[in-house]
Image (spheres, helix red, strand yellow):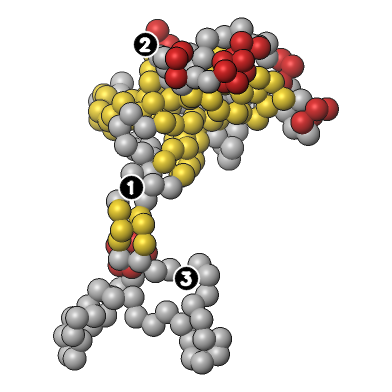
């Protein structure tokens, strides 16, 4: 299991394959990260590395945060993410984590925060059918309908699908194909769409379900 990378969504475009096929791709900028911390099975119960990437004004970090980065002798990073690895001792503090581990044709899992769409009703949020369009229906066309039972249990069960905030949730899309990698530009191009808005933070890992 190799370490993943931290990316920033830059938008979508399309490229032409060698066979003339138009492929929609999402362009992700992956700034070079550095290993900030290592965790071992002996001390922490599992093996992982913490990677920092991106730039941020040093004055915005507090003393504890600066000390955390100073231990690894790296400059403070805007983003900090932890990646599970088979053996954290294979990585050195301050070691670069870049796009080298990815190549065209690989499958990856991409995690991000989906676009927030505000308060939404049951039909938009859950795909409910809604009520009748006519024949006695009045002001209930898009309502959910019954949400409970009778006197017993006399309550609405937790987890009931109801209107509420839609989007702005952590989402992972699996088995996305890597179309192209441009290490000199810190860019990786992924086939199709990925979660989140432009400039949103993405975590890219090797696909779990694809060998």
Dot 1 falls on a residue whose secondary structure is loop
Residue for badge 1: 116
Does 26 sit left or right of 147 as displayed? left
Residue for badge 2: 185
Few, some or many C-alpha atoms within 10 Å of disc 2 (few <14, some 14-19, many ≥20)? few
Residue for badge 3: 160
The circle on residue 127 is none
Residue 22 % position (x, y): 25, 30
User: Which mark is first along the chain, 3 or 2?
Assistant: 3
Numbered disc in front, either 2 or 1: 1
Few, some or many C-alpha atoms within 10 Å of disc 1 (few <14, some 14-19, many ≥20)? few
Spatial separation of the CA atoms under disc 3 and disc 1: 21 Å
User: Which mark is first along the chain, 1 or 3?
Assistant: 1
Residue 133 % position (x, y): 18, 81
Q: Residue at x 60, y 28 (%)?
A: 82
**Quadrant housing the C terminus:** top right
Residue 177 % position (x, y): 43, 32
Spatial separation of the CA atoms under disc 2 and disc 1: 30 Å
**Quadrant housing the N terminus:** top right
């Amino acid at each position: 299991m190799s370490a993943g990378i931290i990316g920033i969504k830059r938008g979508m475009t399309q490229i032409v394959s060698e066979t003339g096929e138009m492929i929609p791709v999402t362009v992700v900028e992956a700034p070079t990260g550095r290993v900030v911390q290592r965790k071992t099975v002996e001390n922490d119960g599992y093996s992982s590395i913490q990677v920092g990437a991106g730039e941020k004004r040093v004055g915005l970090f507090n003393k504890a945060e600066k000390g955390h980065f100073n231990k690894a002798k790296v400059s403070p990073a805007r983003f900090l993410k932890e990646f599970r690895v088979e053996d954290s001792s294979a990585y050195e503090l301050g070691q670069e984590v870049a796009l080298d581990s990815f190549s065209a044709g690989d499958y990856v899992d991409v995690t991000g925060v989906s676009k927030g769409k505000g308060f939404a009703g049951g039909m938009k949020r859950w795909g409910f059918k809604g009520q009748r369009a006519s024949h006695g229906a009045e002001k209930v066309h898009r309502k959910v309908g019954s949400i409970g039972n009778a006197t017993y249990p006399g309550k609405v069960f937790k987890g009931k699908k109801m209107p509420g905030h839609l989007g702005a949730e952590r989402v992972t899309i699996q088995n996305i194909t890597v179309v192209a990698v441009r290490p000199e530009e810190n860019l990786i191009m992924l086939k199709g769409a990925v979660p989140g808005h432009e400039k949103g933070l993405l975590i890219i890992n090797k696909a779990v379900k694809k060998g």
